[in-house]
Amino acid sequence: MKKQIIGMMCLAAMMSSCHIYKAYDRPETIDASGVYRDPASATDTLAADTANMGNLPWKEIFRDAKLQALIEEGLANNVDMQAAALRVQEAKVMLTAAKLSYLPSINLAPQGSTTSMGGGNYVKAYQLPVSASWEIDLFGKILNTKRGQKVAYEQSQYAEQAVRSQIICGIANVYYSLLMLDRQVEITTETAAIYKENVRVMEAMKIAGMTTEAAVAQMRAASHQVEASLMDLKRQVRETENSLAVLLAKAPQTIERSTLDEQVMPEELAAGVPMQLLENRPDVKMAEMTLAAAYYTTNSARAAFYPGLNITGLAGWTNGSGITVANPGEFMLQALASLAQPIFNNGKLIANLKVSKAEEKIAQMNYQQTILEAGKEVSDALYLFDTQNKKLVEDRGQVEQLDKAVTYTKALFQSGDATYLEILTAQQNLLSAQLSEVADNFQRMQAVINLYSALGGGRN
């Protein structure tokens, strides 16, 4: 008896050393420290901050009521979102099936036969058994399969979260693009009207002998250029509306929206501590779940070296014992236990274990790489936001000065100290600066969207 106890203790120690029963734990070699760069610090060190805008509900980031309505519509109707939800349901069903693997399988297996020998009477035999088979999970084969399926279920949930975040940020990005184009159309339309007036004035001046036909032709060409630019902008508006409609799973149509000037965006962005990136980013979590799945696959490959114990049973009625046939039938009961210990499998078990270990190592490297790429996205978004804030200050100063330049040039023209060509040049410079200011304002909004997405925003 003592020898049996000692043998069982040694076997348990051997199994624990092989990690067959050990649950996945994040490797200590996975490092998320220093994955953010500070946009202002010369040492690239970003001060740790427990605040993280990725934890905020998306309605606190995107406050435009019309945009919120579009996002809600997209989350409800988008095809990718619906497909992701169905995959979560599929994974949940598979997890339930894996949990039920601990229970015995029970089958009704009726059989019947009729036999005649030497032209004699037919002998009829039958069986009405219920068969049961139960695999005893001594070495974690079923346990690791169940854990692997649980990981797959969690991975499908993170995949759904990733799609949700992409839809929220994608709709916001296209929406703000529309607002930017609307503002550019508005500026260009005003400029086109000014240029038409300039053509009229230049033609009147030519009649009065105050300018030449060449100057008039140049003014007309500039007016045509602005009109062509306006048509191109309107085309982009139409195409962007169509793209947004498709995101909403609707036919191309006009999108109801606000204006660029009405938008309220965060003045400061908080990235939080790098460790939060490991918990919030769905793609990072998916990479970790891939590593966990590889870990359990390796455990299953280890468990394959150990014996398997199966218990089968049979209960029911029969009138045949295999030798004689008797009527009426009698109740029968049979139980069988079998133990199968792998001895030689042409190296398949060893090869399978080596492959599993290699795949686990690859999954770990991919996990670390995903963290680095996520940190890059956060760093890029932080720097873009900081850059665009500074550029907007310069843009607004430039627009203010060029607006003054147009006014001063007109005054100089009236006093005879400037030509109308100088007025045209000043107006062209002002138009270019105004369009650049709108584009840079959109880039700032895009930085907010990028950071929110990079931090795993959109979960609620």
Image (cartoon, rainbow, N blue to C red):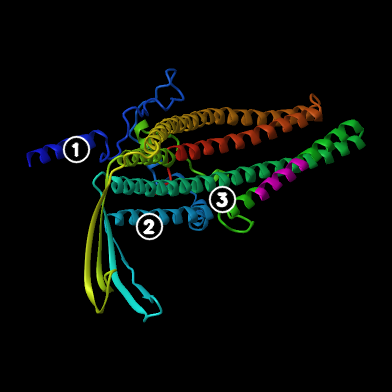
Does residue 332 appear left or right of residue 295 in this picture?
Answer: left
Closer to the eye: label 3 or 2: 2
- Residues 315 and 257: in front is 315
Query: Is residue 342 inside the magenta stretch?
Result: no
Q: Which is more N-terminal, label 2 or label 3? A: 2
The quarter holding residue 443 reads top right
Q: Distance between the residues labelled 1 and 2?
A: 35 Å
Secondary structure beneath dot 1 equals: helix
State the image coordinates of residue 112 (x, y, percent, origin top left).
Answer: 36, 74
Disc 2 marks which amino acid? Val
Residue drawn at point x = 52 percent, y = 44 percent = 263
Which SS type dominates the magenta stretch?
helix
**Circle 3 crowding by C-alpha within 10 Å: few under 14, some 14–19, many from 20:** some
Q: Which mark is residue 93?
A: 2
**Identity of the residue furthest to the front in this view:** 118
Task: Give the camera-side residue of 44 and 8.
Answer: 8
| Region in magenta | 227-239
In the rendered structure, which disc, 3 or 1, sits on the residue that comes first in sequence? 1
Residue behind mark 1:
11
Instruction: Write down the quadrant of residue 278 in the picture.
Output: top left
Kind of residue indicated by mark 1: Leu
- Amino acid type of the residue tagged 3 in the rendering: Ser
- Residue at 74 percent across and 45 percent down: it is 231
Residue where numbered disc 3 is placed: 258
Q: Viewer-nearest of labels 1 and 2?
A: 1
